[in-house]
Image: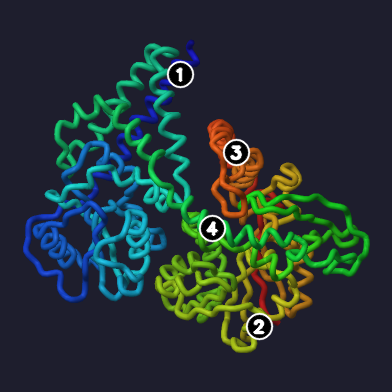
Amino acid sequence: MIWAEVFWGLIVLLLMADTRRIHIRLASLPVLCPDESDDGDTHRWVVAPGIVLDDMTRQSAAAHLQAQGLSALDVVPGSVPLATAWSYGCHIDPQAHRKDGDRPGDTAAAAFLAPSVVLDGLGTTDVAPDLATFISWAREVRRRVDGPHDLAIAPVLCAQRENPFFDPGALEVKLGGSSAPVVFGIPFATILVLLGPVVAPWMGSLALLCHVLQQALAVRKTGFRVRYPWLQGLVRFVVDVRQWLGLLRGPVVSRERVNALRPLYMEQLEAGLERFFEPVVESCPLCGGTELTRGFSLPDLYQGKPGRFQIVRCKGCQFRFQNPRLSVEGLNFYYRDFYDGIGEDALDMVFGATRALYLDRIKMVRSLGIPRRWLDVGCGHGHMFSHVRTEMSSTRLEGLDLGDGVEIAAARGWLDEAHRGLFPECANDLKGRYDLVSMCHYLEHTVDLRTELTAAHLVLEPGGHLLIEVPDPESLFARILGRWWMPWFQPQHLNFASTVHMAQLLRDAGFEPVEWHTGRAHQPNDCTLSFYNIVRTWAPKLDVPWRPPATRLQRIQHTLVWIPGLLFVGLGGLIDRLLNPIGKRLHHTSQYRVVARKR
């Protein structure tokens, strides 16, 4: 019983800390003052469904935007139910929104005022067709405006009748493609709080009281007009369950997109998987040795597309590579809907949440001096350059990639110039332009390492530098976690060069390595993502267009696996955090980083 009291005592502390966190967020939102100002011809409004934008809010918002020197403003309804105000605090972080220019914009899913030229580029309408589209526009506007973007409470503006953050489509966009954290989180938290008084009478009862009062305490002394907040707090369980049931009953936007893609995928799969692979090679592509191990095979653990992929090792030089490798048609099939399409929101969120990693790379580059012209090969949506833009404002930034993400990066202002295509094919047109080229988590996706390094040598000026970051196949975590180690990342990772291999490849290509980061480049996510892989094997993603629609029984089984599975993944995160100080001191960890000078 004493351990139960301790456990629920910790829950009390977490509830109190969460209340303070939400209160700080809500209290930091400025409140619009009554004023009369014209929106002008340079800006226009975009309004979410269910919102009636009154003239006072329009004029007050335009005046606030001008007075504060803002480029865009998202308005937060001030007249709201208690549960909606609490949701604003969960989904809006004003301080992070103002500080981090690369993150998607926070929004109250009501209305925003933005430059017409930006909105025209996004193809927006005055009223969004649905909440999911509105949130997508609002998040992207934050990245495309040339200047500060903020949020403010409009006191007389009324929110939608239903909490916008329990709309399935809106929640999927906000959370990166899945509403699972809310679908699983609300019943888990509710059961935990209700069970408290039974298992731990003292601390459990206190946790229940904190849970009931939490929302009303969070909105005190903020700019929101909430009627009878304490009374609404008393019926929190009823409101939470009603919102949760509405979320379950609502149409799932991602499922509709998946269903539309299913005929195309099924047609491709009917022809078989053989054409997605090159013939098996009998010799090592690095040293030519013919003694290859059987290695191990993996499925596609991330998208769950069909097929198994073999990783072999050369006994002579220890080089690891995918064998047989994907063909061009296979690369197109397995990459589709991962970085773009139905996978774009999730990957955009992941790449936008690795600020510390980008700053580590920038720090390594700064030790060599400020580059004049920097090309990032495999730049994706350009998230790294959003930070480089701040740290090195005088550097001309250019990106190269195959997908349309490079053009999105240019539209966001993170690139000065975008190049689209295969790097070796574009290299002649870019010859001798750059004093810095970066290839961060790019080379492991390529077929021929030597060809890529030759292209880098060609586009660099004499004495220019090449920055490379790749997974370390000699990682201690790879040995412990085996085939579950995330950076094997099949089927996308085609080769795995160790530091020894990379040093030789660089010298053969005309480079001299000048600085290595091994343990210093470690990222504490090995166990988290590996444990996620294990759970995903037991319960793969259901709503995907390369498999038939899931049955009700499959959805129940999926839920029963993932409820304890989330705790297992959380355990992996805890292990990563505890081991991070050790990992930073080891020689071979999750990845390595090297800077080489062109000879």
Residue hosting label 2: 425
Closer to the N terminus: mark 3 or mark 4?
4
Residue 301 is labelled as none
> Looking at the image, which residue is at 62% across and 63% down?
335
Residue type indicated by callout 2: Glu
- Residue annotated with mark 4: 357
At label 1, which amino acid type do we have? Val
* Disc 4 to disc 2, C-alpha distance: 29 Å
- Which comes before the other along the chain, label 4 or label 1? 1
Q: CA distance from mark 3 to mark 2?
A: 42 Å
The residue carrying pointer 1 sits among few (fewer than 14), some (14 to 19) or many (20 or more) residues within 10 Å by Cα, namely some
Disc on res. 572? 3
Give the crowd class for mark 3: few <14, some 14-19, many >=20 residues within 10 Å: many
Q: Residue type at mark 4?
A: Leu
* Residue at the image point whose x is 86% and y is 66% from the top: 281
Find numbered disc 2 in the image and state the secondary structure of the residue it sits on. helix
C-alpha distance separating marks 4 and 1? 37 Å
- Dot 1: element: helix
Single out the mark in the foreground, 3 or 4.
3
Q: Position of residue 338 (x, y in %)?
A: 57, 59
Measured as percent of width and height from the top left, residue 354 is found at 50, 56
Residue contact between numbered discs 3 and 2, judged by CB atoms under 8 Å: no
